[in-house]
Image (cartoon, coloured by chain):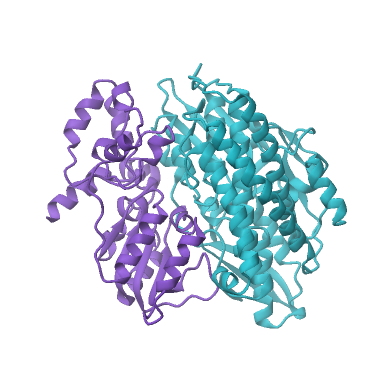
Amino acid sequence: MNQQLAKKRLGIFSLTCCEGCQFALLKDYISFQKVLEYYDIINFRLAQETNLPGPFDVVLIEGTPESDREIKLLKEIRKESAVVVAIGSCAILGGIQSERNRLPQKYIGSEKVKTIKNVIKVDYEIPGCPIDNTETIGYLLNLYFGKNIELPDYSVCFECRQNENNCLIKTKKLCLGPITRGGCNSVCINGGEACLGCRGATNQANFDKLRETLKSFTDSEEIENILTIYGEYEKDSKDRHDRK
Amino acid sequence: MTENEIPQIEGHAAFYTHLKSGRIDQAKIIGLDGERFVEKILFGRKYWEAPIITSRICGICPVIHNITSSKAVESALGIEVSKQTTKLRTLMLCGQMIQSHSLHLYLLVLPQLMGVSSSFELQANHPDLFKNAITLKNYADSLIETIAGRAVHPVSNTVGGFKSFPSIKELDNLILKAESALLIAEDTLRLFADYKYPLMTSKMIYSALSDKKYYTIYDGDIRSSDNHVFDAKDYKKYIIEELMPYNKAKYASLKGEIFMVGAMARYNLNGKYLTPKTQTLLQDLQIENEFKNPFYNIIAQAIENFHFLDHSIELLKQLIKNIKPEEIIQPKSFGEGASACEAPRGTLFHYYKIDKKGYIEKADIITPTVQNLSAMENDMKLINPKDFEKDELNMFIELLIKSYDPCITCATH
């Protein structure tokens, strides 16, 4: 490493979730080493005893804010950070817990699930359930050098074909590959599972067309179910279009 | 009265102690994670979604939720899986145990035992020990990746069987990795058995899956040291959950009694079924065959690390001879079913009721940490605060809680 480069200050925070993104980030300690060359980690409760409240150059946040404590924490983090990155399906789409937004209020007896961008301004998003560690570490290095995070905008099918998997839709199985953002190396389809959309939709996703295709072999209840496993997939896509 | 947030555990929690005439008369563990209502959000979902959604309960132990959920749904749908499926799942569970235990031992406990503040500092000052942690975790990760497609949140295991199968070459590679990792697991056990842990004796009831043949983690009855024996389907009669006003996680008792689950409980109840190699090593190190000190849960984890590594080699060698692609078994009937498996932190229960069209009507999940919370609070009260300076006392309580390896994310779900 170039010794003249000053390290930047990184915080890694977790709100309500499974913490799988933090573990995915630590999955390969050797590549995580790269992060430590460019950043001082000044807050990472899962991995260290001493944690500071800020200031941060970059902050990664996973999970959804559920309690007043977590909402307050989010606002404090925003004040202390130059760049806020939401990581994982919970932080971006609401995660599995946002299913409760579809159920009657009375049944759950709790408020609706918010995503991080409902509470504070988010600068970037890194999708996945969980995030891919190599992709995330790459983005962290981008941010260090002042570059933007540009997510790939091809569908999962693109990588799935390169991996020579058999197309699930052609064999009449549910799959969200055609409208879901790639970059995951089609890990689920490689392992025999369908794409269930954890990375959110591509910018040009055509929901109506996919629904029409899937309806020829399955009922609409099941289609709506799979469109909501990792959160408000379609709403997130619409919101992105509206913002443009 | 003090409240302290606990760093380096899974999930967010604080502990609280109240002193009265020099003794700790109240000890509470307060979960700070929000509730995700996982059981309720399963309502109206297709049965095959349960293992996918419930693995998201926990990022450190997704595999065990994935498998216990599959097993419970299978029992609700009258599905009996093949012997090969059972073997593949047991291998995934071996990987889960090694992954979780080695992470807990090296990255969460060891820094505190050695007086360094983080795993990163450990990495800088003790690169050899750090390398051990990586070797063990890498083996566990590649074991789960090879069998189940991905290390965090597996993809290949589903209700009725597996959606993809490892090749002979991949299994061969795993065996090679396993053999060198086994040596590290032995060093690990020597290292953790050597530490001088605080002395504490807790009169405790232990509970774990057992089948009186193997060191079982995938099936069997639940047996306790106070002689309860029950099948997973009767879990509600034995494991009684109750809500405490100060914690979002529930507290469970074994028919009203405080009890402990996890590595130490399994070791105390099923120690004689550990692999022969593990037993020889234990004799070598003169480790007693029953632990009463809750801090020794740490040693029990190191023992299990070695055992599950050794056991995984045996299973891999069996599989390599005759692994073949199998069809996924389809539902035969629709109804209710429960199952229990051993998670790194203790017995995990899943229960589902499924309607005639295959949609989930009801779900219930009891996690190991929920079963351990009362035992942790019980043991905190055994501490005599007069023995410590204030900062020391907090460190001591932290280590005690860490020994139990609580997972607040799981407990709150």
Picture residue at 26% right of the left edge, 54% below the top: A151
What chain is the purple one? A
What chain is the cyan one? B
Drawn side of residue B254 relative to residue B107, left or right: right
Picture residue at 88% right of the left edge, 56% below the top: B286
Image x and y of residue B60, in percent: 53, 52
**The N terminus of chain A appears in which quarter of the rendering?**
bottom left
Image x and y of residue A227, in percent: 29, 38
Work out whether residue B42 can be spotted.
yes
**The C terminus of chain A appears in which quarter of the rendering?**
bottom left
Image x and y of residue A33, in percent: 47, 66
Q: Of residues B196 and A4, which is closer to you in this image? A: A4
Residue A22 vertical placement versus B308 (above, below): below
Drawn side of residue A209 relative to residue A20, left or right: left
Total labels drawn: 0
Question: Quarter-wise, where is residue B84 in the image?
Answer: top right
